[in-house]
């Protein structure tokens, strides 16, 4: 059939159709204009950034590493917390209704739980809202004591000497039976639904600082643990401002605002000279928390992709600018012009952490307390060129450490100097020669005192920064005539190996979680071996002094005891303390209200996303 054109519409009908079409388009445009502000107002406020190290799990009793604790710190809550703005830091009640009643010379603490606090909804609760009660804290602390949980935080809790708790743990261990959560513990009691009483064997005036670590000692519901069993690390359910929404291990973590979170409003007590803190208080006071809706975290272990994720807008916050890029971000200590034009905000802080190299004291090569092996560790420490590390690998984002004690904590003295901060390869070689670590076969490499080969095996990771630190160690030890080998694994795997005593040497960072400097020495406390004490150092005199310092009030006598602990650590060198980090965080202009916390892990609820 031949093609025939259809007759055209009369002009009158065509004009009418065009009028209707224009009117319809105008109506749609007006509707779109009206909807745009509403859509913008309802758009979720999302904080997006990357962790440089993969998380391990989200069970507060089982976490040890910083990045997992950042997540648990926003899901779980302790009895106490820290003021968001105060410098120096100040404790305040969090889930407790008020500061506790303290009796019997800091041996008995009675807390009243704030009513109206609920756990985030979870199927474990059978569809009902589950209110926080005193028994949840009893259960949470008992889980840390349960040997089946293998909590790395037991050593920390054990030192406070809760009456009957260590005995309950011992019964489970010695009897090869499950921990009995239904048997009463004399020093850990829920007197009623809202009253918790903790009784200690000896005075512990700093118990409240420990209980402010909600990321590890926060309230846990027994129903949740019993529902999920061994998979509890993937199902964190707390009373905090956020809850876990999605998780792809070592890849991506999404948290969302906890819709059942109680009414909490922005407040703080900045000092009169704290201009930044006072400005934040003036801007946000009275705002309901949290102010954002969601947090999306990517795991990007390589520095360059993590840096680029911020520059290209995939992330709106950069936690810890990689040291390799600090001269690009902050040339001469000032924000780069291209970032300044985008109104990027920079926050530079000396953080309360210490970069450590651990020596496994149970390792047959670097371990042992005999003079020869002590000499080997001290020689390796003296041969570590920390100035070179700071200048080349860390781009001057580190100050030298003289001990394990972190800035801002009691016992830290910026004027203190020790061999820990020395770089002296000549003395190192002399120590090795004196104690028999010499080259017997003329191949240029030293042997062990018994003549067997000497190789120092250092655990490391695959990222570019770790590769650079490994090259520094090889450079340092080559100069001493000591052969090295490197074993590469992911950071969580290295942590696991360190806790089980299967690593010879490893570099890692230890961040202070309380203002008390005694926490730095738990890493050398014998009963904490395999937990905080990754070096597995065991020295009775050190343990006695450490336990004594736990009881002492602040003052000159306690500072003298901490100094003695520093000197023992220096003499036997279970760790080489290399430095304390300077950290620069960057935020896109829409991220407002950020201030790096010193000792707490929770801060997301105190920021807003604007624009």
Image (spheres, helix red, strand yellow):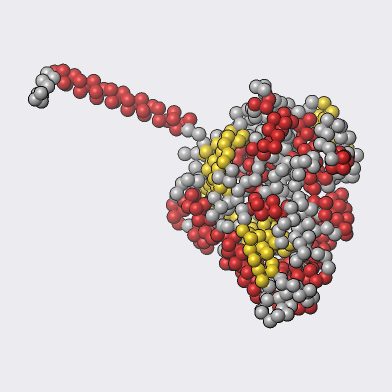
Query: Looking at the picture, how far across and down is residue 245, in whole percent?
Result: 58, 34
What residue do we see at 80% from left, 48% from top? 155
Q: How many marks?
A: 0
Query: Looking at the picture, how far across and down is residue 172, in whole percent?
Result: 84, 39
What residue do we see at 58% from left, 57% from top? 462
Q: Who is closer to the viewer here, 548 or 466?
A: 466
Q: Who is closer to the viewer here, 573 or 599?
A: 573
* Residue 234, picture quadrant: top right
* Residue 306 in view here: yes
* Residue 593 in view here: no
Q: Who is closer to the viewer here, 471 or 442?
A: 442
The quarter of the image holding the N terminus is top left
* Residue 258, picture quadrant: top right
Query: Looking at the picture, how far across and down is residue 515, in whole percent?
Result: 74, 50
- Residue 518 vs 471, above or below: the answer is above
Q: Is residue 268 left or right of residue 340?
A: right
Q: Who is closer to the viewer here, 265 or 298?
A: 298
Q: Is residue 603 left or right of residue 193?
A: left
């Amino acid at each position: 059939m031949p093609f025939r054109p259809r007759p055209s519409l009369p002009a009158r009908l065509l004009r009418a159709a065009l009028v209707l079409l224009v009117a319809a388009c105008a109506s749609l445009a007006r509707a779109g204009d009206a909807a745009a502000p509403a859509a913008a107002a309802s758009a979720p406020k999302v904080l997006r950034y990357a962790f440089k190290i993969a998380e391990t799990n989200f069970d507060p009793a089982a976490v040890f590493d910083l990045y997992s604790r950042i997540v648990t710190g926003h899901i779980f809550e302790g009895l106490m917390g820290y003021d968001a703005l105060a410098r120096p830091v100040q404790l305040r009640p969090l889930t407790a209704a008020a500061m506790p009643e303290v009796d019997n010379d800091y041996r008995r603490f009675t807390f009243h739980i704030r009513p109206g606090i609920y756990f985030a909804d979870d199927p474990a609760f059978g569809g009902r809202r589950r209110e926080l009660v005193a028994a949840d804290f009893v259960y949470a602390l008992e889980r840390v004591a349960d040997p089946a949980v293998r909590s790395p935080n037991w050593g920390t809790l054990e030192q406070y000497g809760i009456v009957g708790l260590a005995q309950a743990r011992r019964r489970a261990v010695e009897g090869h039976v499950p921990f009995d959560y239904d048997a009463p513990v004399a020093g850990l009691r829920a007197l009623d639904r809202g009253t918790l009483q903790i009784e200690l064997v000896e005075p512990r005036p700093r118990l409240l600082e420990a209980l402010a670590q909600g990321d590890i000692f926060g309230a846990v519901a027994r129903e949740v643990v019993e529902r999920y069993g061994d998979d509890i690390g993937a199902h964190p359910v707390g009373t905090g401002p956020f809850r876990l929404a999605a998780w792809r291990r070592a890849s991506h973590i999404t948290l969302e605002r906890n819709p059942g979170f109680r009414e909490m409003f922005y407040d703080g007590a900045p000092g009169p000279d704290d201009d930044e803190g006072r400005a934040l208080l003036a801007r946000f006071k009275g705002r309901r928390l949290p102010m954002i809706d969601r947090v999306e975290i990517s795991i990007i272990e390589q520095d360059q992709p993590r840096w680029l994720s911020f520059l290209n807008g995939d992330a709106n916050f950069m936690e810890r600018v990689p040291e390799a890029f600090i001269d690009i971000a902050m040339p001469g200590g000032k924000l780069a012009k291209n970032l300044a034009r985008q109104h990027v905000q920079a926050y530079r802080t000396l953080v309360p952490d210490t970069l450590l190299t651990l020596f496994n004291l149970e390792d047959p090569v670097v371990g042992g307390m005999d003079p020869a092996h002590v000499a080997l560790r001290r020689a390796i420490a003296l041969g570590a060129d920390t100035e070179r590390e700071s200048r080349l690998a860390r781009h001057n984002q580190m100050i030298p450490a003289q001990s394990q004690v972190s800035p801002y904590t009691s016992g830290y003295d910026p004027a203190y100097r020790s061999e820990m901060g020395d770089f002296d390869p000549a003395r190192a070689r002399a120590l090795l020669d004196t104690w028999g670590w010499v080259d017997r076969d003329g191949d240029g490499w030293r042997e062990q005192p018994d003549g067997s080969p000497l190789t120092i095996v250092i655990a490391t990771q695959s990222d570019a920064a770790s590769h650079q630190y490994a090259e520094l160690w090889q450079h340092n030890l080559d100069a001493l005539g000591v052969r090295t080998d490197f074993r590469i694994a992911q950071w969580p795997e290295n942590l696991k190996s360190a806790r089980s005593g299967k690593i010879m040497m490893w570099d890692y960072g230890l961040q202070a979680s309380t203002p008390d400097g005694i926490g730095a020495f738990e890493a050398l406390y014998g009963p904490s071996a395999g937990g905080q004490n990754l070096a597995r150092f065991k020295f009775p005199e050190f343990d006695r002094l450490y336990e004594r310092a736990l009881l002492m009030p602040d003052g000159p006598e306690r500072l003298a005891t901490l100094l003695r602990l520093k000197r023992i650590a220096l003499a036997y060198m279970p760790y080489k303390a290399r430095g304390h980090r300077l950290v620069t965080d960057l935020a896109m202009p829409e991220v407002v209200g950020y201030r790096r916390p010193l000792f707490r892990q929770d801060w997301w609820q105190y920021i807003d996303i604007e624009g």
